[in-house]
Amino acid sequence: MGAPTSAIQGRASMSPTSMQWGSYARIAEALCVRLALLPPGSPGQSETALSGEFGLARNTVRRALGR
């Protein structure tokens, strides 16, 4: 028998969860821009608010903030 279709195409299909790997890097970049625009001492958005806005898990947002 031959190789599975996904192997022939070079990549297995990605689940929504696997597509989020690396999402923290894109969020980190967006947050750097936002934080640079805030006046010193201004509070940023909460992890919960950011996770809702970006549609990602709070842990992904936390990882972006720690970057």
Image (cartoon, rainbow, N blue to C red):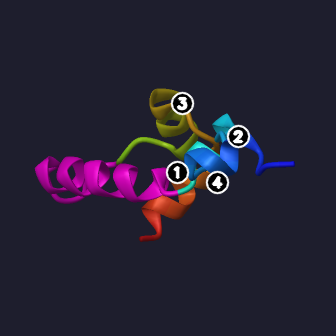
| Marker disc for residue 55 | 3
Residue carrying label 4: 59
Does 20 appear in magenta? Answer: no
Find the magenta span and give its range. Answer: 22-43
Disc 1 crowd rating (10 Å Cα; few below 14, some 14-19, many 20+) is many
Mark positioned earlier in the residue sequence (3 or 2): 2
Image x and y of residue 66, in percent: 47, 69
Report if the CB atoms under discs 1 and 4 are less than 8 Å apart. Answer: yes
Image x and y of residue 26, in percent: 36, 51
Determine if residue 12 is in view: no
Identify whether 48 is placed above or below 38: above
Q: CA distance from mark 3 to mark 2?
A: 31 Å
The secondary element bearing badge 1 is classed as helix
Identify whether 14 is placed above or below 35: above
| Marker disc for residue 13 | none
Mark positioned earlier in the residue sequence (3 or 1): 3
